[in-house]
């Protein structure tokens, strides 16, 4: 009985939120389930690319500009490469950059937000000012500037994107800390002689996790779009013939419009959209599920 | 006062800096607590009674400041301790039970983890040992030790408050400050909590400062009662003395305003008016605007705290006269 509960979505969400969730299945739960499934399937596709892609995505395997057929499910490009294989392989870079960049942002933004919110004062003022100035730039513009400055390798693009999302984590966590540190259980922890480190790490941080989870998911979606934007502008990390959705999209969208070779631009665009949709649904679902409950607690 | 005092507060003054100006929350307050003694501090909201508890543990909010006075615990002046020394004092020597058991436990931590965390903050031992101490303590407080695995939201209000008490005493402190520990609990549970506190005093010789607005509870639990009004100590006496012959008009009013559960009691007495604004307290005696027997001297001069009878202190020019009928 108990183990069944743990395996269900209810059980899992309950473990995250530590709050009881009522039946029946709500809109948010559908969001999370659908979003989560999309993310899972796309990850599995990229992960298992060597086993499921029918052709090598970097070499000629058929005639040029073939529309979708049983032989080439998504058609072929100018060089006769199989688009289906390129789509399968092409998710690896955006998925990894999106995830790794967001993990970096998390690793920098969360601790700074915790310290800034907890200690306040001038430290907080200066840090908030810096973060707000980063935040005030449109993400893509900042990424372009950083990519131009650092040069566009996979690592540099990841760093550039990571910088963009640090302020998002910082602001959310700082705001949460400001309210959590006024909670009675924090005062109670101080009153039993807890060290500052313990208070921040054991009492405050865990209570910010629900908000962080939401920001995390939404930031990955955004980071993937930014990577796509950079690739689309020719500042992407990918060197041809390595497959990458956004690279293919920008390479072929002109032909798709002028010559009617729709499959060249449609599939990369569709998969970028699908991935972003998956993360957004997941994040929004978490948001709607956790926020009202947090107010309830 | 005597030398056996475990905790002695002398001339304590606490102010809050607010947007409207300096708010004097506690004004020149003195009180001594002996080992194993329970003193109730009674007063209306805003009388400074909770601030007193926060000041003793030095956990006032950032805008609160101790501007004057001394708080001695076992001969050490708490006011002069460093942050590190304070941390060693908190929980281990003096601890606090907070008003609201619903919010004074971390919602994301298991009960057991909170107890273990508290122990390990002060003692060097492994987790398992700390867990066992916690489980034994819960059993001794009449709580099934299986509750160690529960989260706060799985427990009832009374159960949570017992857990909060367990957290407060797990390190065997000498003094426990209980800040309205029975708020929001039903009457039966209230008395269970009081009995538990009394038992702890008897078994562990813990001294308790019991902060409350409820004179009935104060009478039930304490040895002495201190009445606070607008940041001042207005009357202090052994509880029976205070109940039999309250000397300060405010105390008289408070006692009269306890509803009586008898057939012929018709009306509920209340003290007219409201407690004063503490940014601009009234001149003279702070109670004079609400006092039925105030005279012109009361409006001009602040009365001193006088020992009218042995161990019965009162701050009033007309102490002992009947103010409320």
Image: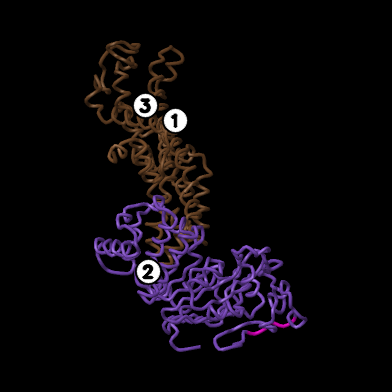
> Which residue is rendered at x = 43% and y = 72% of the image?
B176
Q: Is residue B163 visible?
A: yes
User: What residue did someone put label 2 on?
Assistant: B169
State whether residue B246 is above or below residue A70: below
CA distance for labels 1 and 2 = 65 Å
The answer for which chain carries disc 3 is A
Q: Are marks 1 and 3 in contact (CB under 8 Å)?
A: no
Q: Which chain is purple?
A: B
> Which residue is rendered at x = 37% and y = 57% of the image?
A202
Nearest the viewer among B302 and B240 is: B240
* Residue A161: image location, x then y, percent: 41, 40
Nearest the viewer among A30 and A165 is: A30
Local packing at callout 2 (Cα closer than 10 Å; few below 14, some 14-19, many 20+) is: many
Nearest the viewer among B109 and A85 is: B109
* Membership of B303 in magenta stretch: yes
User: What residue did someone put label 3 on?
Assistant: A245
> Which residue is rendered at x = 46% and y = 39% of the image?
A287
- Compared across the picture, whether B42 is left or right of A25 comes to right
Q: Secondary structure at mark 1?
A: loop
Q: Which chain is brown?
A: A
State whether residue B32 is above or below residue B170: below
- Residue numbers of the magenta segment: B300-304
Looking at this view, name the residue that lies furthest to the left: A51
* Residue B116: image location, x then y, percent: 31, 61
């Amino acid at each position: 009985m108990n183990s069944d509960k743990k395996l269900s979505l209810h059980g899992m969400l309950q473990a995250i939120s530590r709050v009881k969730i009522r039946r029946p299945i709500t809109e948010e739960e559908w969001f999370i389930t659908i979003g989560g499934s999309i993310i899972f399937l796309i990850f599995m596709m990229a992960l298992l690319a060597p086993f499921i892609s029918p052709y090598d995505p970097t070499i000629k395997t058929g005639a040029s500009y073939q529309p979708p057929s049983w032989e080439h499910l998504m058609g072929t490009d100018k060089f006769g490469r199989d688009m289906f294989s390129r789509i399968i392989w092409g998710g690896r870079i955006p998925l990894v950059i999106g995830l790794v960049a967001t993990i970096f942002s998390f690793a920098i933004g969360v601790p700074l937000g915790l310290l800034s919110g907890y200690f306040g004062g001038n430290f907080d003022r200066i840090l908030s000012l810096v973060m707000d100035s980063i935040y005030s730039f449109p993400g893509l513009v900042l990424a372009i500037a950083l990519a131009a400055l650092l040069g566009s390798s996979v690592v540099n693009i990841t760093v550039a994107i990571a910088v963009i999302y640090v302020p998002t984590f910082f602001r959310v966590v700082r705001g949460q800390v400001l309210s959590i540190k006024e909670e009675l259980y924090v005062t109670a922890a101080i009153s039993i002689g807890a060290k500052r480190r313990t208070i921040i790490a054991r009492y405050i941080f865990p209570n910010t996790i629900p908000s962080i989870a939401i920001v995390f998911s939404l930031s990955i979606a955004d980071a993937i779009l930014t990577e796509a934007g950079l690739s689309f502008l020719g500042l992407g990390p990918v060197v041809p013939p390595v497959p990458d959705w956004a690279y293919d999209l920008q390479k072929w969208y002109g032909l798709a419009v002028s010559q009617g070779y729709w499959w060249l631009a449609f599939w990369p665009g569709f998969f970028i959209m699908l991935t972003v949709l998956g993360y957004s649904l997941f994040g929004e679902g978490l948001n709607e599920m956790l926020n009202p409950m947090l107010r309830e607690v | 006062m005597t030398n056996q005092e475990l905790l002695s507060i002398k001339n304590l003054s606490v102010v809050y800096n607010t947007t409207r100006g300096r708010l004097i929350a506690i004004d020149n307050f003195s009180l001594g607590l002996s080992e194993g003694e329970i003193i109730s501090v009674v007063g209306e909201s805003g009388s400074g009674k909770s601030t007193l508890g926060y000041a003793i543990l030095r956990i006032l909010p950032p805008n609160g400041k101790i501007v004057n006075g001394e708080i001695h615990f076992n001969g050490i002046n708490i006011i002069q301790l460093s942050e590190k020394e304070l941390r060693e004092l908190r929980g281990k020597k003096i601890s606090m039970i907070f008003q609201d058991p619903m919010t004074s436990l971390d919602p994301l931590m298991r009960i057991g983890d909170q107890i273990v965390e508290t122990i390990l903050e002060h003692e060097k031992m492994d987790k398992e040992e700390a867990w066992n101490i916690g489980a034994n303590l819960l059993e001794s407080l009449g709580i099934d030790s299986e509750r160690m695995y529960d989260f706060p939201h799985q427990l009832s209000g009374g159960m949570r408050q017992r857990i909060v008490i367990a957290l407060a005493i797990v390190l065997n402190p000498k003094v426990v400050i209980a800040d309205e520990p029975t708020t929001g609990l039903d009457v039966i549970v209230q008395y269970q909590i009081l009995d538990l506190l009394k038992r702890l005093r008897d078994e562990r010789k813990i001294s308790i400062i019991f902060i409350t607005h409820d004179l009935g509870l104060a009478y039930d639990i304490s040895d002495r009662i201190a009445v606070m009004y607008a940041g001042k100590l207005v009357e202090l006496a052994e509880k029976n003395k205070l109940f039999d012959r309250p000397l300060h008009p405010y105390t008289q009013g408070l006692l009269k305003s306890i509803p009586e559960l008898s057939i012929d009691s018709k009306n509920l007495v209340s003290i007219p008016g409201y407690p004063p604004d503490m940014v601009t307290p009234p001149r003279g005696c702070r109670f004079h605007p609400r006092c039925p027997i105030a005279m012109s001297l009361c409006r001009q001069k602040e009365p001193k705290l006088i020992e009218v009878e042995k161990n019965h202190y009162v701050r009033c020019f007309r102490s002992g006269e009947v103010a409320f009928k």
